[in-house]
Amino acid sequence: MKHSEQVELFNRIRARYAMFLTSVLWKLAGDRELFTEAMQYTLFEMWQRIDKLRGDNAGAYLYRIALSANSKAWRNRVGKNGRINADLLCPAPGQDEALARREMARIVRRAVAELPAQQSQAIVMRYLEQHDYDAIAEKLNCTQASARSHVSKAMATLKGRLAKLTERE
């Protein structure tokens, strides 16, 4: 494929799926800087894999790219020791409750990012994007029963991990 054709295809796909990608990444990231980083990774991966984005499965493939990009952005933010740098957390006086909510949201997003790929995709589609099981099955290329199973396993894993966190505190 010629470079000009690649650019044209990239621009068409980006325009067609811009709102979809924005919605998915914003719900996963939760803050502007992380969202921006995840979007950059997503656009870069779109460009790298432009040949695979032809056809009807472009949306499902872009969804997988977005989830991977979000995970990469989180790994870069969290670092090797698994903790966010204390300099990034500077609460203003009286905002302890808001900070606690943001911290819990961060913990949940991180736990979702650590799930197996199909489970994390299924739970995000079900509870953040409000898809029914038929749509989840279609995007994951599996049966409706498998989609239900992925959501159920993800919920069980998340409940276990989050329960352990609350016991420690």
Image (cartoon, rainbow, N blue to C red):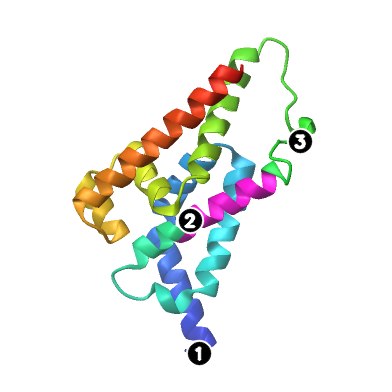
Disc with the residue nearer the chain's start (1 vs 2): 1
Report the predominant secondary structure element of the magenta stretch: helix
| Location of mark 2 (residue) | 66
Q: Amino acid at mark 1?
A: Lys
Residue 167, position in %: x, y? Answer: 55, 18
Q: Could you tell me how far apart the alpha carbons at marks 3 and 1 are, in whole angstroms?
A: 44 Å
Q: Give the residue at x 54% y 86%.
A: 3
**SS type, badge 2:** helix
Q: Which residues are magenta?
A: 65-77
Judge whether residue 140 is colored magenta: no
Q: Amino acid at mark 2?
A: Ala
**SS type, badge 1:** loop
Up-down relation of residue 101 to residue 124 (above or below): above
Residue sitting at the far right: 87
Question: In terms of depth relative to the viewer, which is nearer, 109 or 49?
Answer: 109
Nearest to the eye among marks 3 and 1: give it.
3
Residue 95, position in %: x, y? Answer: 65, 14
The picture quadrant where one finds residue 57 is: bottom left
Up-down relation of residue 137 to residue 126 (above or below): below
Nearest to the eye among marks 1 and 2: give it.
2
Image check: 78 left or right of 103? right
Disc with the residue nearer the chain's start (3 vs 1): 1
| Location of mark 3 (residue) | 85
Q: Could you tell me how far apart the alpha carbons at marks 1 and 2 are, in whole angstroms?
A: 25 Å
| Location of mark 1 (residue) | 2
Residue 19, position in %: x, y? Answer: 41, 52
**Mark 1 and mark 2 residues within 8 Å of each other at the beta carbon:** no
Question: In terms of depth relative to the viewer, which is nearer, 20 or 114?
Answer: 114
